[in-house]
Image (tube, helix red, strand yellow):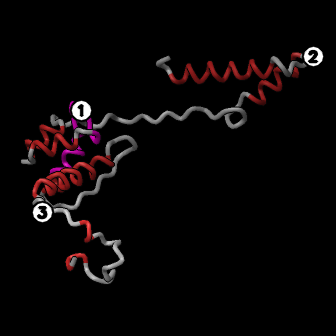
Amino acid sequence: MNNPFKVFDEVRRAYLRYLDSPFRLRYDALMEERRNLLDQDGQLYRDPLIEPVAPYESSPFTVSAACRELGIPRRVADFITLGLFPADRRLYEHQFDAWSESRKGQAVVVTSGTGSGKTECYLLPVFAYLAEEAARWNPSGPFDNRRFWWDSKFDFRQSAAGL
């Protein structure tokens, strides 16, 4: 089953045999003519279109190694590998390059094929930034449940900083 063309031909022939069974004709010449009419691209099937895609070049970095290389705290890698990216998977070269350039403040545009990890090219820097920012947050002090924004005692036109 490693040959997609062979699989296509087997399925095509099986389907044509199936159509011959319940719709049998008395004359073999008519059955052959019907089969020849149906056994053409665009009738019962479309000829397969195989698009070769070169494999994307892997970098030598996992998320943890990339964090070390970029000077990002280990806890960021721990956060990212909780679900966004498997801990043992190597980043593609363009993913690491996009992350590296975005850390330098550069705008990054990634154009590559489907399944190349373009989504991770922007999610890795975003999640890394959020995890780093969260580590800098100070505790907010005691909880005051009277300060909910939806509480009708407050004027909604007031800025959030004024609460």
Residue 109: x, y in percent?
28, 57
Q: Amino acid at mark 3?
A: Gly
Name the one closer to the observer, 21 or 123. 123
Q: Residue drawn 6% across and 48% down?
A: 71
Q: Amino acid at mark 2?
A: Arg
N-terminal of the pair, mark 2 or mark 1, is 2
Q: Residue drawn 34% across and 42% down?
A: 116
> Label 2: how many residues lie within 10 Å, few (<14), some (14-19) or many (20+)?
few
Q: Which residue is mark 1?
A: 89
Magenta stretch in the rendered image? 83-100
Q: Which mark is residue 39?
A: none
Q: Which mark is residue 26?
A: 2
Q: Which mark is residue 141?
A: 3
Residue 161: x, y in percent?
20, 77
> Label 3: how many residues lie within 10 Å, few (<14), some (14-19) or many (20+)?
few
Name the one closer to the observer, 9 or 86. 86
N-terminal of the pair, mark 3 or mark 2, is 2
